[in-house]
Amino acid sequence: MAIFSIIAVFLTIAALLSYINYRFVRLPSTVGLMMIALTLSLCLIGLGKLGFGIEEQAGRFLTGIDFSETLMKGMLSFLLFAGALKINLEDLSEQKYIVGGLATVGVVATTFMVGTALYFAFQVLDVQLSFMYCLVFGALIAPTDPVAVMAILKSVKAPRSLETKIAGESLFNDGVGVVVFLVMVGIATGGATTGIDTVLVLFLKEAVGGVVFGFAIGWAAYRLLKNVDDYSVEILITLALVSGGYALATAIHTSGPIAIVVAGLMIGNHGRMYAMSDVTRDHLDTFWKLIDEILNAVLFAWIGLEILVLAFSWSYFVAGLVAIPLSLLARFVSVSAFVGLLRFRRQFSQNAIRILTWGGLRGGISIALALSLAAGEARDLIVAVTYVVVAFSVLVQGSTVKRLVQM
């Protein structure tokens, strides 16, 4: 199918679901769109059972599009840049220890806690998945999803310091999460050397390399912006920064997500202050807010529809339900440990641990990583379990975190 037809279909679906949510459902956009899309998918599955062919046609359409490739090498760069533009560097600097700890050691610790607990739980349930593939699941579910987190935070009105902790962690933990995921997949498939030196080189190349590369392209874009006073040209420069920067980062095998976040922080802070007029700032903010909202609408509608092409069974669904509390418990332990260690340096609100735990949403990135696995029974199980955890995270955690913040 032509790329224009695919874009047209998804924009139309996102627009219709957004209209339904705005007029009748009235949930936060991310939660409402996914819930309506998921309901539509279940209705199509029901119609398929009754003999109608709509489910098969929708399934063939979705199968022809690579969700993992589209999100990780297309939409994600624009969503990350739009999110990073809003983060104040001074606020982020004040939370650097908790953000850095959760985005690095926290991701690794959560990977092993979730993977180990899930392995023993699956033994009890008689679900066949090797320990290494359980760690693969732990790695893809450990990072919080910046797209889901930033979308929900817009409607929560959390205290500024708490919002910076949650958003900052979600923006930076992808690089570490992808490195851990690649290492675990390499061990599980026996296709990679996994010595400490190899892992360290991979981390330096992906994470540290992403920071350096992001700073370089952000600085280059800043210099260009500083010499121009035309908002259409300046917005075009930011578009080139995001698309070209992400593509080049991928080509040189460094972390595209981290590079774009660093570049976004530079443009959103240094660039806004020293390289833009008030008119440009207003147009830039409006443009990237619109890009953010359109892509979010498309993404979460798509996630809701993905159930049409997943290999689901009752045992997979039960396995997913078991994985939900295990993922939350590992997140709670990780957050509690870092908050406890840092209490002697700074104050934390009384319910900070609960909000950081419940507000650490999983989303499309986890699904994309699961779908990137090689075909097989392990992949089918991991994708199904991941989908259940993500659905719970967005629909239940996403719709209730506001009440938790206001308690």
Image: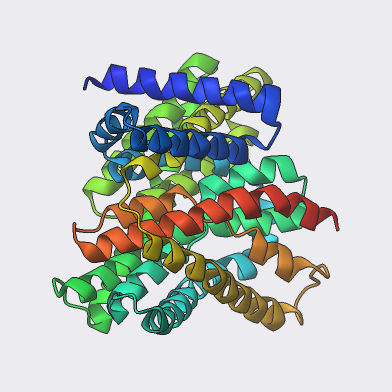
- Residue 51, picture quadrant: top left
Q: Is residue 398 left or right of residue 13?
A: right
Q: What percent of the width, then of the height, locates residue 34?
A: 53, 39
Q: How is the image coloured?
A: rainbow
Viewer-proximal residue among 57 and 378: 57
Q: What percent of the width, then of the height, locates residue 251?
A: 22, 46
- Report the quarter where the N terminus lies: top left
Q: Identify the residue shown where x is 19% and y is 58%.
A: 374
Task: Establish if 32 lies above or below 192.
Answer: above
Q: Is residue 376 visible?
A: yes
Q: Identify the residue shown where x is 56% and y is 55%.
A: 392
- Residue 116, picture quadrant: bottom left
Q: Is residue 157 left or right of residue 335?
A: right
Task: Establish if 286 lies above or below 269.
Answer: above
Task: Establish if 96 lies above or below 292.
Answer: below
Q: Is residue 204 visible?
A: no
Q: Identify the residue shown where x is 66% and y is 62%.
A: 358
Q: What percent of the width, then of the height, locates residue 232?
A: 50, 15
Q: Is residue 63 left or right of residue 80?
A: left
Q: How many numbered marks are there? A: 0
Q: Identify the residue shown where x is 22% and y is 76%.
A: 187
- Report the quarter where the C terminus lies: bottom right
Q: What percent of the width, then of the height, locates residue 255?
A: 35, 54
Residue found farthest to the left: 191
